[in-house]
Image: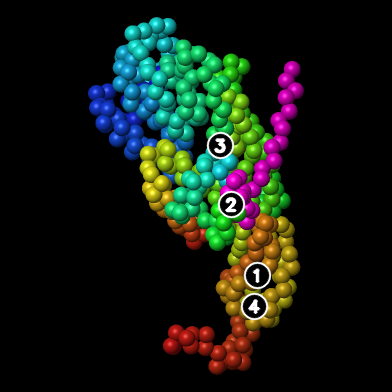
Amino acid sequence: MSNQMIKSEIGVIVDENDHISLVKLCRSCSLPAEQILQMVERGVIDPIDPSASYSHWQFSSTSLLRVKTALRLQRDLDVNLAGAVLALELLDEIKQLRQQVVYLQR
Amino acid sequence: MEYKDYYKIMGISKDASQKEIKSAYRKLARKYHPDVSKEKDAEERFKEVGEAYEVLKDPEKRTAYDQLGANWKAGQQGFQPPPDWDAGFEFHGDTFTGGSAGAEGFSDFFESLFGHAGGGFQYRSDQGSGAGNQYQMRGEDSHAKVFVDLEDTYQGTSRSLTLRSTVMGPDGRPQLKPRTLNVKIPKGVKAGQNIRLKGQGSPGIGGGPAGDLYLEIEFNPHSMYKVDGADVSLDVPITPWEAALGGKIKVPTPSGSIDLKIPASISSGKKMRLKGRGIPAKQAGDFYVILMIVLPDALNDKEKKLYQELQQANNHFNPRSKLGV
């Protein structure tokens, strides 16, 4: 007899207003800090207060998803960081335009 | 088991050169990459193409596959590789592409021929099963899209999802299994936002922690409300006399109807803001009411007479003065 209960998993919103530290970002993406710094330089993500020292940098928690997407694009499509950044920016723009189309079509 | 025609999957002929295979793969990977593609079955196609490329890019695997596949057609069931099918072939220990496809696991068909791929590391039985234990690696994150109603985000909701994901089998090897997950979606979530479920992604390798599952939220199209970020808006029809005299009207919102006081002498298209009545996100959105003056289909004699009186009472108002007429 199967009395297996399906456990309810509680989702947490990845909110742009929540912050994540540089250390935590590195750990979550399994990346050395140098690579995150490179991503900041290239504009993949922006620290909330760029004038703070590296070790105190905080990022919006959606940065985590952006870094991971940049990594996937590089790995799967065989593009360099600059190519991935270009793709990310174009994807952002497409997403925005699609939202506008949906909004205007209603 | 279903026989897979890797050439057909990649849309190339059996005598394609290695260069052609590479170029076909690059094109298809761009087309079906789950981060880029809007195709419905993008993820599945991307995995399939990754698997096909894994075999065809390697001349050794390709030759073995060609020999095996001569008598099979795509989709044909009942496929079992002959026990000694790979006799005489030596596969060198090149790692799998390690793309998303590899980490999520290849098809049974692939694995019966070439062994398991997990997170970019090769698990081939003849390499000793201990190899996997030397690595400790966090599992891959998984992604899925979830459609909810706008109303759901006002109070939170639950969704039952069936995901095909990699789990560790009893022999310590990853295998693909359908898995049902009951997910509580918190209130205040906006379209395009992700929800993270810790440890619900792919299992880690060599005892490493599991990855996370990310659910991207999309709203089902709504017949009344328009959503822009956390703000919600609604076109509300009003009568000409409500527009002229003002008063209280009933207005629906996703969290229930409210009484809205409209000022006197308000024009069609004017927007009224109800602060904090949008999506209850961390920074709550606003609810906008856009007023639209609507007339009855036909006026009765009394109404007509009253409008004529109105016309006489105010003959200097020109709403088109800005148009220069």
Give the x, y percent position of residue B124.
47, 16
Amino acid at circle 3 = Asp
| Crowdedness near tag 2: few (<14), some (14–19) or many (≥20) residues, C-alpha within 10 Å | few
The tag earlier along the polypeptide, 4 or 1, is 4
- The answer to the question of whether label 4 and label 1 lie on touching residues, with beta carbons closer than 8 A, is no
Q: Chain of mark 3?
A: B
What separation in Å lies between label 2 and label 3 (alpha carbons)?
26 Å
Per the rendering, the mark at residue A55 is: 2
Q: In this rendering, is residue B220 above or below B305?
A: above
Q: In this rendering, is residue B297 above or below B142?
A: below
Q: Which residue is mark 3?
A: B141
Q: Chain of mark 2?
A: A
Q: Which residue is mark 1?
A: B273
Badge 4 marks a residue whose secondary structure is helix
Per the rendering, the mark at residue B243 is: 4
Residue at screen point 50% across, 13% down: B128
* Residue A63 visible at all: yes
